[in-house]
Image (cartoon, rainbow, N blue to C red):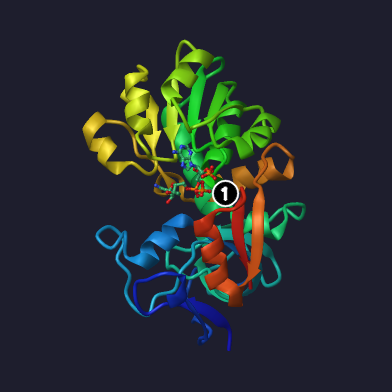
Amino acid sequence: MPKAVRFNTYGGPEVLDVVEVEVPPVGPGEVLVRVRAAGLNLGEAKIRTGFLHDRFPATFPSGEGSDLAGIVETVGSGVTRFTGGDAVVGFTDDRASHAEVVVVQEANLTAKPTSVPWEVAGSLFVAGTTAYAAVRAVAPTEGETVVVAGAAGGVGGIACQLAKRRGARVIGTASTKDHDWLRSIGVEPVSYEGQLSEALAALTPRIDAFIDTAGHGNVQLAIEAGVDPSRIDTIIDFPAVGQFGVKAEGSAAAANSAVLAELLALLEGGELEVPIARTFPLDEVQAAFRYLEDKPARGKVVLIP
Ligand SMILES: NC(=O)c1ccc[n+]([C@@H]2O[C@H](COP(=O)([O-])OP(=O)(O)OC[C@H]3O[C@@H](n4cnc5c(N)ncnc54)[C@H](OP(=O)(O)O)[C@@H]3O)[C@@H](O)[C@H]2O)c1
């Protein structure tokens, strides 16, 4: 029987078990995928602790995981785009990708380019679509200046690169350990420790758009710097949305396989970089989440079932 991650109560990584499960039935329009890589996201840790209980409650026993890349095993009736043996990238809304096999809607899958590594493909969905939505929400144009708070994070790093592709000047807030990497992708780094508004003012007389992936008062800072609320997007500071009328477009706004295919084409062409911090076998899911929550290195953390 295939293995899958389950938890039966809210708590720390220690509540995560890897258990044997039945192979899920494959309905019409669905595809059974043998997972080769499945990314971890902080949102999963927040759901597991119960922190997001009011917005995203868990029912027990709960699975977890949205991001995935793998090989098609079987397809249900009516599936036309994929067949057994195809390499695919996609997502599930069923909290189920941290597993050896997962059933996915055909519409949630796209073909995996051969040159994109499994761990990159399998950790692209949440970070990639969130970054895509955030950049689209603030719509930077040629010559404008965009600030990305949390620029070296999973979402922030992709957002920086997508904003650069629109011709914008991108300034990214990050701790100094990540400044060289940000420079390597054409982003001007600024440290978030210390007086951030003064540091930004020293770099630019005007900020046209602001993407907040970090919280910590960044939305207020953007408002005080004179950025129009319609050009501020936060994926984390939801109280600030009501307070300042800024946008909150995140993964849900771009959660589809067409966006994934666009991002995969950029990766294939060497026009987008998604760093990988570390991979873990499925059986080490507890260690993987401890590592994610400690965040010792930049990049995605990925399970390899
Ligand atoms: N709304 C949505 O749809 C959505 C989707 C995805 C993620 N999220 C949320 O967005 C947040 C970021 O996700 P992620 O996957 O990108 O996380 P991540 O990979 O852990 O990145 C977070 C980054 O923020 C940096 N950071 C920490 N404190 C900061 C501060 N005060 N100012 C600027 N940067 C700071 C961290 O840098 P250091 O390493 O230096 O600490 C790290 O590089 C998480 O809270 C996640 O739950 C929301």
- Any part of residue 244 in sight: yes
Q: Position of residue 235 (x, y in %)?
A: 39, 42
Horizontal relation, residue 263 to residue 251: left or right: right
**What's the amino acid at mark 1?**
Leu
Q: Position of residue 72 (x, y in %)?
A: 64, 70
Depth check: give the residue in front, 258 or 82.
Answer: 258
Residue 207 lies in what quarter of the image?
top left
Q: Which residue is mark 1?
A: 260
Q: Is residue 211 above or below residue 33?
A: above
Badge 1 density bin: few <14, some 14–19, many ≥20, Cα 10 Å: many
Q: How many marks?
A: 1
- The quarter in which the C terminus is drawn is bottom right
Depth check: give the residue in front, 85 or 238.
Answer: 238
Horizontal relation, residue 296 to residue 253: left or right: right
Q: Position of residue 57 (x, y in %)?
A: 29, 66
Q: Position of residue 12 (x, y in %)?
A: 41, 69
Horizontal relation, residue 41 to residue 233: left or right: right
